[in-house]
Structures are given as structure tokens and as C-alpha cells.
Amino acid sequence: MSRISMDQVKHVADLARLAITEEEAEMFTKQLDAIITFAEQLNELDTESVPPTSHVLDMRNVMREDIPAPGLPREEVLKNAPDQQDGQFRVPAILE
């Protein structure tokens, strides 16, 4: 027995503004039914002793030491600027 009907697939496609053919609707109905069946199988697993996680791998940030270094001279930075004023980049105003 299918857990999703072709009418439901067509309805969702219509909501998403997707034009699908009858063959595609039939194919998506079978594929979505397989996905729902698999999800139902996962719901049957006993996960009581499994701690909740946000990721299956140990995630950690790898940071380098922050060592201050001198920057480029202002003149060198501004030499290719299309427009500058008072030693700064001049850009169009974005606030009205």
C-alpha cells in the first residue's frame, strides 16, 4: 500500500510551481513512498541509549595563533583605488 498518492504528489508539485508529467508524478510517487518506508524503519530503532548529537563526527575549530603583523602602507593600499579621499576609500552612499 502506498503511503503517498499521486494526487498528493501533484498537489505538492503545484504548490512548488513545478510542472510535472504523469510519468514523473508516478515516478515521484514511488520514490517518495520508498523514502517514507525507510523513515518508518528508522523510527522502529531503539535509540534510548544513544546520546543526542548535532554531528556524527567530532567537530572542533582548528585555529592558528593570532600573531599581529604590520599591514601594508596606506599609500600602497590606496594606489589602485578608483576613488579616495583623505586617505580612505571613497564609495557611493548606500543609506537614503
Image: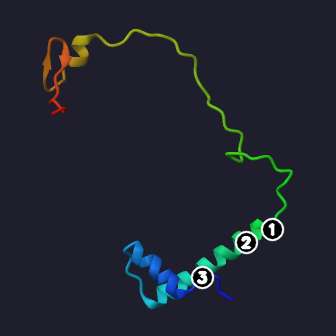
Mark 2 burial class by Cα count in 10 Å: few <14, some 14-19, many 20+:
few
Q: Is residue 13 above or below residue 69?
A: below
Percent from the top left, x then y, of residue 87?
Answer: 18, 12
| Residue 73, x across and y down, in percent | 28, 10
Question: In the image, 25: left or right of 45?
Answer: left
Residue 76 falls left or right of residue 64: left
Q: Residues within 10 Å of mark 3 (few under 14, many from 20)?
A: some
Percent coordinates x, y for residue 33 in the rendering: 63, 80
Rendered-image quadrant of the N terminus: bottom right
At horizontal 32% and vertical 13% (from top left) the residue drawn is 72
Q: Which residue is mark 3?
A: 4
Amino acid type indicated by mark 1: Glu
Mark pair 2, 3: CA separation: 13 Å
Marks 1 and 3: CB-CB under 8 Å?
Answer: no
Residue 52 position (above or below residue 86): below
Q: Secondary structure at mark 1?
A: loop
Q: Quadrant of the C terminus?
A: top left
- Going from N to C along the chain, the mark reached first, 1 or 3, is 3
Residue at coordinates 25% horizontally, 18% vertically from top-left? 77
**Residue 30, label in figure:** none
Mark 2 or mark 3, earlier in chain: 3
- Residue closest to the eye, 5 or 33: 5
From the image, tell me which residue sits under label 1.
44
